Image (spheres, rainbow, N blue to C red):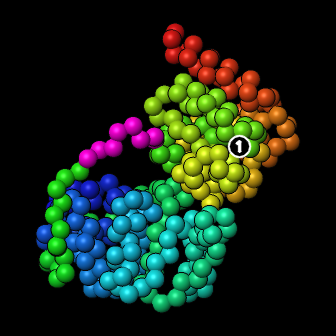
């Protein structure tokens, strides 16, 4: 209920029509009601493509809708192409170690797309906005949402951070990561740690921090690539950052080809000095 209040901002993002569904029986946490209402709406309108965000809520909602529509769901999509009359989606497979191009057949096509892989469309037109009602669906219920609790001390998600400090195999050992963590701390609460695929594959850092085509796509205002050579799959996940600063001992490293500022030097000397200078500037 009250979904109409969010339609205004959405109407300016390039769609022809923006629809809000007010479903009977819905309350926060009742994803079963949301899934039933959305599936019914897709059936009644005959939509050919249904796109979800590959976020926590999206991963909860999308498979429920797919099950109700008896349609396959292509998850964690990083690219979408139209080939002829069909849609081809690129998505990671084998725990993110490879990419598969999958052609969707039949309708509706259901996709969940990773955040930040596409730029927000700038459209001068204003979409038609509407609010529709959905009756309570059979089969919903059977549980009670008692409340929500905020997690404490959780690290900022790398895909949501305004500043990202990422490290590569050039960090030599996971025990050296506090050097990057100190730089992140100096940059403030909007900064998060990231990592290259090689680092994650080596078990040095969790997959949640992986930046790249088989990890997360990030669009921070400032991105530090520390001891990262710049493999193509890594560049695909961070090249749209506002400002890219690269530190690497190899002057020919590919990362310098996309960097706005490059420092050819030892990360173990440069990173602590950067943190020191940032703190000095903050104290002025």
Residue furthest bottom as drawn: 106
Q: Splitting the image into 4 quarters, where does residue 126 fall? A: bottom left
Image position, residue 245 (x, y; %) = 68, 35
Q: Residue at x 30, y 80 (%)?
A: 39
Q: Residue at x 27, y 59 (%)?
A: 7
Residue furthest top as drawn: 284
Q: Which residues are magenta?
A: 149-156
Q: Nearer the viewer, residue 151 or 277?
A: 151
Verify whether residue 7 appears in magenta. Answer: no
Q: Which residue is mark 1?
A: 168
Q: Splitting the image into 4 quarters, where does residue 236 fall? A: bottom right
State left or right for residue 257 relative to residue 54.
Answer: right
* Secondary structure at numbered mark 1: loop
Q: Is residue 215 above or below residue 251?
A: below
Q: Residue at x 52, y 38 (%)?
A: 192
Q: Is residue 70 above or below residue 153?
A: below
């Amino acid at each position: 209920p009250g979904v109409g209040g969010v339609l205004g901002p959405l109407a300016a993002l390039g769609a022809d029509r923006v629809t809000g569904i007010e479903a009977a029986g819905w309350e926060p946490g009742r994803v079963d009601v949301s899934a039933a209402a959305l599936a019914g709406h897709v059936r009644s309108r005959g939509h050919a493509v249904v796109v979800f965000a590959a976020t926590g809520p999206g991963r909860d909602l999308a498979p429920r809708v797919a099950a109700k529509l008896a349609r396959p769901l292509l998850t964690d999509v990083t690219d979408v192409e139209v080939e002829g009359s069909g849609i081809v989606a690129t998505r990671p497979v084998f725990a993110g170690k490879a990419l598969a191009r999958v052609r969707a057949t039949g309708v509706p096509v259901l996709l969940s797309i990773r955040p930040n892989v596409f730029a927000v469309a700038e459209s001068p037109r204003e979409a038609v906005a509407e609010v529709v009602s959905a009756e309570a669906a059979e089969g919903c219920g059977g549980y009670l949402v008692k409340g929500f609790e905020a997690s404490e001390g959780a690290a900022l998600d790398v895909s949501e951070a305004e500043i990202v400090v990422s490290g590569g195999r050039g960090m030599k050992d996971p025990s050296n990561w506090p050097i990057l963590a100190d730089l992140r701390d100096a940059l403030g609460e909007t900064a998060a740690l990231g990592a290259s695929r090689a680092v994650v594959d080596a078990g040095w850092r969790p997959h949640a921090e992986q930046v790249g085509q088989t990890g997360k796509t990030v669009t921070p205002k400032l991105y530090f690539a520390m001891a990262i050579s710049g493999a193509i799959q890594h560049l695909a996940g961070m090249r749209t950052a506002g400002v890219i600063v690269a530190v690497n001992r190899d002057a020919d490293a590919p990362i310098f080809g996309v960097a706005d500022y490059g420092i050819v030097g030892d990360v173990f000397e440069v990173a602590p000095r950067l943190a020191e200078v940032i703190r000095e500037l903050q104290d002025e």
